[in-house]
Image (cartoon, helix red, strand yellow):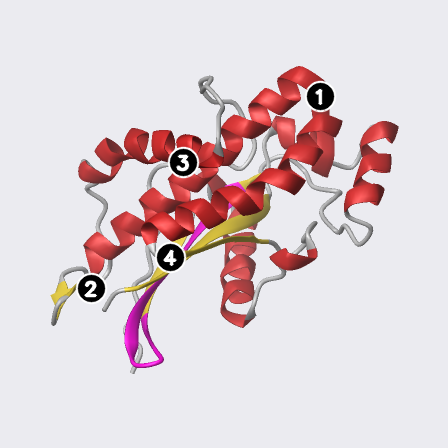
């Protein structure tokens, strides 16, 4: 029987695109390492309450959620660092190329280090690999409903602990809000050169027409706990 924890994250862990402090870029491994170190204190000091938090058998649910948050933030920080550098040097067109080429290696490197599965999903996916499965789709739809009621997307999160193939597993999703800089590649009025690049890289792109404050998608972290 599934034991489920639902949480609304009380601070924005990361945003796939947006303004942050500058970070030196480097290899995916170096960037991931920097991002992980930068989030350790955030996780350590977290005082957010998790429904039914505590320990069941050998599983510390609160610790599992905290680790999943850290992984999501590390991934977002690493990708964001690459994206900021690309936008600065070559604008949105260059940024699209970085997302296309760097997101997967960064996720793969961090997943290997943390023994977890990391991905991005969206109801209006750009990359065909980012289509949500059933439970992810349900969470994204819930995020959309909450956003429509005025809830801050940057503070939205979801976590559950389930039984999967005989093991307990943490499933975590961090909502990604649309901020100003996202509109250059995901908004309703996109420059012609960006549109052309999108057609080249993502011929089946659905991720346009967004408005500021909407749910762009989510980072997903899945990790076996025993």
Q: Element at badge 4?
A: loop
Return the residue at label 1.
91
Return the residue at label 3.
32
Upstream in sequence: badge 1 or badge 4: 1
Q: Nearer the viewer, mark 2 or mark 1?
A: 1
Residue 44 image offset from top left, x and y in percent: 18, 38
Q: Magenta span has 172?
A: yes
Q: Residue 116 bears which disc, if any?
A: 4
Question: Which range is magenta?
Answer: 162-176
Upstream in sequence: badge 2 or badge 1: 2
Q: Magenta span has 99?
A: no
The residue carrying pointer 3 sits among few (fewer than 14), some (14 to 19) or many (20 or more) residues within 10 Å by Cα, namely many
* Residue at (47% x, 22% y) in the render: 20
**How far is mark 3 from mark 4, CA to CA?**
14 Å
Residue 193 image offset from top left, x and y in percent: 85, 28
Upstream in sequence: badge 1 or badge 3: 3
Q: Nearer the viewer, mark 1 or mark 3?
A: 3
**How far is mark 2 from mark 1, CA to CA?**
46 Å
Return the residue at label 2.
52
Q: Element at badge 3?
A: helix
Q: Element at badge 2?
A: loop
Upstream in sequence: badge 3 or badge 2: 3
Residue 180 image offset from top left, x and y in percent: 62, 27
**How far is mark 1 from mark 4, CA to CA?**
32 Å
Q: Element at badge 1?
A: helix
Q: Residue 24 bears which disc, if any?
A: none
Image quadrant of residue 160? Answer: bottom left
């Amino acid at each position: 029987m599934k034991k489920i924890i639902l949480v609304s994250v009380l601070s924005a862990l990361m945003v796939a695109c947006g303004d942050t402090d500058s970070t030196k870029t480097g290899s995916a491994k170096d960037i991931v390492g920097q991002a992980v170190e930068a989030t350790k204190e955030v996780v350590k000091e977290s005082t957010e309450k998790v429904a039914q938090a505590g320990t069941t058998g050998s599983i510390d649910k609160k610790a599992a959620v905290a680790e999943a948050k850290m992984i999501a933030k590390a991934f977002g920080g690493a990708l964001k660092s690459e994206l900021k550098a690309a936008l600065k040097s070559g604008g949105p067109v260059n940024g699209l190329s970085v997302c296309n080429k760097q997101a997967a290696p960064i996720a793969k490197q961090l997943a290997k280090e943390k023994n977890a599965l990391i991905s991005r999903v969206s109801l209006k996916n750009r990359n065909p690999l980012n289509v949500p499965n059933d439970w992810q789709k349900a969470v994204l739809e819930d995020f959309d409903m909450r956003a429509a009621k005025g809830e801050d997307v940057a503070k939205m999160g979801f976590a559950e602990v389930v039984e999967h193939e005989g093991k307990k597993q943490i499933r975590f999703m961090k909502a990604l809000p649309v901020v100003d800089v996202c509109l250059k590649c995901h908004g309703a009025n996109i420059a012609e050169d960006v549109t052309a690049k999108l057609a080249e890289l993502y011929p089946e792109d659905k991720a346009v027409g967004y408005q500021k404050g909407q749910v762009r998608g989510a980072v997903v972290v899945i990790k076996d706990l025993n």
